[in-house]
Image (spheres, rainbow, N blue to C red):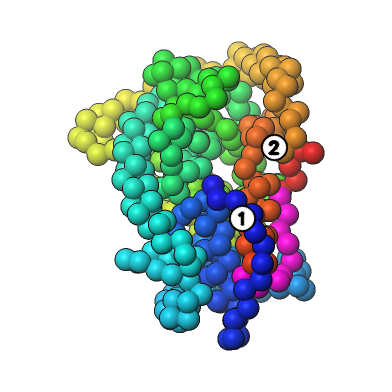
């Protein structure tokens, strides 16, 4: 992650249009992560220009999708004017040409890590009450480091949050693929840092950082309608997107990837997945009764007690949530420093809008 340590103002002799500001702001944001963007990524992550104005009124946004042709034209104009640089289809801040080679290497690393991630997560389909698994964090953006773990956001059936979490814990532990509580680094291990229930899909904490994270999510398991739907979204993921449409006020063209990635192979497609789903359904049928309700209460009490007794729960600069509908474990979040450096970057390039805030991290 790049930290801007010198803030100046770069003035240009041309009028900075709304679209130009949006494009530049988007490139500035991802420059913090040392990540140059392709045209498709700029289009997808494009920051809403109304967040770059001094009279920002979030409740009165008149949203309109950025036109792809206009973005292409503006990128060409900005490159010719020297506002941004580009190489082989990737755009970045001037004098950051070294990011191109880093991006190529990151893409290669991401491909290797995706194979490992998919090879592990396919077995999570054994878990009863699991509905959706998203890849999140650096892997979802294709910007991992060699020692990066695999951040995961999951959706679990309402009323079975803590039971579903236990099953995921057991399966990932058997596989030797779970990040431990005290691991400082855990390369290629699953980090289940966010759980939602299928009746509570709207994220209440909002910021540019959260919106960009949402736009980056990649669904890899989708049991939202009881069956895998290949490249098509199920009603549950559609509902998740609709519940978080507020992200459009931050990301102009907010939408989630509709095609999720699965490991190829006849064994998985023809035999393994149906077998896993059948066992998961048997587990649900077995626990959809009084005993299952009792087990959920016991697990809820036990898990919440452990969370409350963990000092990391109360650390500043992060957020830990534990309720009947959501579990979030980000005790040490990068969000604050990302937002601070994004605001500095805007000032450096003469974009004097309202400063962004974090999503309400613990002080």
Residue lying at the far right of the rendered structure:
363
Q: Is residue 173 magenta?
A: no
Q: Position of residue 223 (x, y in %)?
A: 44, 38
Q: Which residue is mark 1?
A: 4
- Highlighted range, magenta: 349-358
Q: Residue at x 67, y 32 (%)?
A: 331
Q: Residue at x 59, y 81 (%)?
A: 12
Q: Which residue is mark 2?
A: 318
Residue lying at the far bottom of the rendered structure:
14
Q: Position of residue 31 (x, y in %)?
A: 52, 57
In the image, is residue 21 above or below residue 192? below
Q: Secondary structure at mark 1?
A: loop
Give the class, few, some or many, for how many residues have Cα within 10 Å of label 1's Cα (few <14, many ≥20): some
Q: Position of residue 139 (x, y in %)?
A: 44, 42
In the image, is residue 127 above or below residue 19? above
Q: Position of residue 328 (x, y in %)?
A: 64, 34
The mark nearer the N terminus, 2 or 1, is: 1
Closer to the camera in the image, 218 or 353? 353
Closer to the camera in the image, 103 or 302? 103
Q: Quadrant of residue 61?
A: bottom right
Characterize the magenta stretch by its predominant secondary structure: loop
Q: Is residue 353 magenta?
A: yes
């Amino acid at each position: 992650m790049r930290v801007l340590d010198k803030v100046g103002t770069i003035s240009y002799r041309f009028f900075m249009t709304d679209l130009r500001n949006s494009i530049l702001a988007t490139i500035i944001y991802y420059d913090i992560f040392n990540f140059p963007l392709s045209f498709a990524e700029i289009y997808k992550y494009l920051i809403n220009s109304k967040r770059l104005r001094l009279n920002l009124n979030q409740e009165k946004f008149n949203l309109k999708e950025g036109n792809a042709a206009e973005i292409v034209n503006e990128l060409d104009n900005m490159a010719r004017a020297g506002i941004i640089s580009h190489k082989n289809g990737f755009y970045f801040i001037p004098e950051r040409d070294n990011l191109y080679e880093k991006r190529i290497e990151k893409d290669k690393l991401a491909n290797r890590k995706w194979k490992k991630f998919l090879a592990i997560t396919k077995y999570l389909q054994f878990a009863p009450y699991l509905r959706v698994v998203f890849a999140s964090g650096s892997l979802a953006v294709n910007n991992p480091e060699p020692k990066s773990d695999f951040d995961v956001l999951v959706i679990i059936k309402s009323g079975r949050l803590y039971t579903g979490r236990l099953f995921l814990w057991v399966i990932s532990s058997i596989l030797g693929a779970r990040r431990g509580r005290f691991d400082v680094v855990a390369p290629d291990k699953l980090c289940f840092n966010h759980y939602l229930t299928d009746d509570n899909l709207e994220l209440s904490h909002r910021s540019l950082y959260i919106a960009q994270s949402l736009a980056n999510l990649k669904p890899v398991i989708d049991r939202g309608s009881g069956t895998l739907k290949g490249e098509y979204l199920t009603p549950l993921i559609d509902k998740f997107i609709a519940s978080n449409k507020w992200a459009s006020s931050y990301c102009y063209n907010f939408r989630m990837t509709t095609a999720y990635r699965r490991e190829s192979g006849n064994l998985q497609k023809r035999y393994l997945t149906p077998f896993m789903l059948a066992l998961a359904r048997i587990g649900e049928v077995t626990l959809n009764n009084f005993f299952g309700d009792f087990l959920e209460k016991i697990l809820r009490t036990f898990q919440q007690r452990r969370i409350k007794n963990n000092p990391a729960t109360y650390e500043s600069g992060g957020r830990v949530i534990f309720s009947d509908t959501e579990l979030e474990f980000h005790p040490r979040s990068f969000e604050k420093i990302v937002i601070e450096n994004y605001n500095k970057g805007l000032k450096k390039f003469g974009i004097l809008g309202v400063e962004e805030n974090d999503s309400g991290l613990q002080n």
